Image: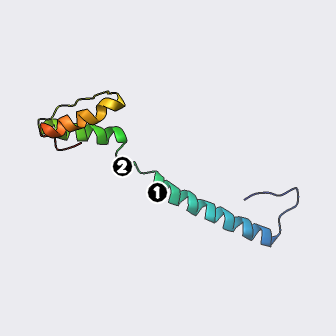
């Protein structure tokens, strides 16, 4: 219980303080239950790795291309012409 000054708190103040302490205990328990568990969400790194693994399993190879904007459209047309499914 929280002591206020040197005087003994009135019953109303004691009751109010006990309610606050109970609410704080409840909130702490709820937060611990919710956030205390390890998150099962995957990180972006894990998602990217799984995507790369799936593509590798399909026999695909990763290729990164840097091109000038004026060459980009020509590259897209070439990829379509040789049978690429994506732009």
Q: Give the residue displayed 79% in from the left and 68% down from the top.
A: 13
**Figure check: 6 above or below 57:** below
Residue identified by numbered label 1: 34
Of residues 28 and 48, the one drawn nearer to the viewer in this rendering: 48
Q: Tell us which disc is closer to us: 1 or 2.
A: 2
**Marker count (numbered):** 2
Of residues 37 and 22, the one drawn nearer to the viewer in this rendering: 37
Asked whether, in this view, residue 69 is left or right of residue 85, the answer is right
**Figure check: 19 above or below 42:** below
Q: On the rendered image, what quadrant is the C terminus found in?
A: top left
Q: Give the residue displayed 36% in from the left and 42% down from the top.
A: 43
Q: Give the residue displayed 75% in from the left and 57% down from the top.
A: 2
Asked whether, in this view, residue 62 is left or right of residue 70, the answer is left
- In the rendered image, the residue lying farthest to the right is 6
Of residues 76 and 29, the one drawn nearer to the viewer in this rendering: 76
Q: Return the x and y of residue 19 as percentages of the image width and height.
A: 67, 68
Asked whether, in this view, residue 51 is left or right of residue 43, the answer is left
Q: Return the x and y of residue 8 as percentages of the image width and height.
A: 84, 63
The circle drawn on residue 41 is 2
Quadrant position of residue 7: bottom right
Q: Return the x and y of residue 21 as percentages of the image width and height.
A: 66, 62
User: In the rendered structure, which disc, 1 or 2, sits on the residue that comes first in sequence?
Assistant: 1
Helix, strand or loop status at disc 2 = loop
């Amino acid at each position: 219980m929280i002591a206020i000054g040197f005087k003994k708190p009135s019953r109303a103040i004691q009751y109010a303080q006990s309610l606050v302490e109970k609410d704080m205990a409840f909130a702490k328990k709820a937060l611990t239950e919710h956030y205390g568990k390890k998150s099962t969400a995957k990180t972006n790194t894990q998602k990217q790795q799984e995507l790369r693994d799936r593509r590798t399993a399909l026999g695909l190879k990763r290729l990164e291309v840097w091109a000038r904007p004026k060459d980009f459209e020509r590259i897209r047309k070439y990829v379509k012409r040789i049978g690429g499914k994506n732009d």
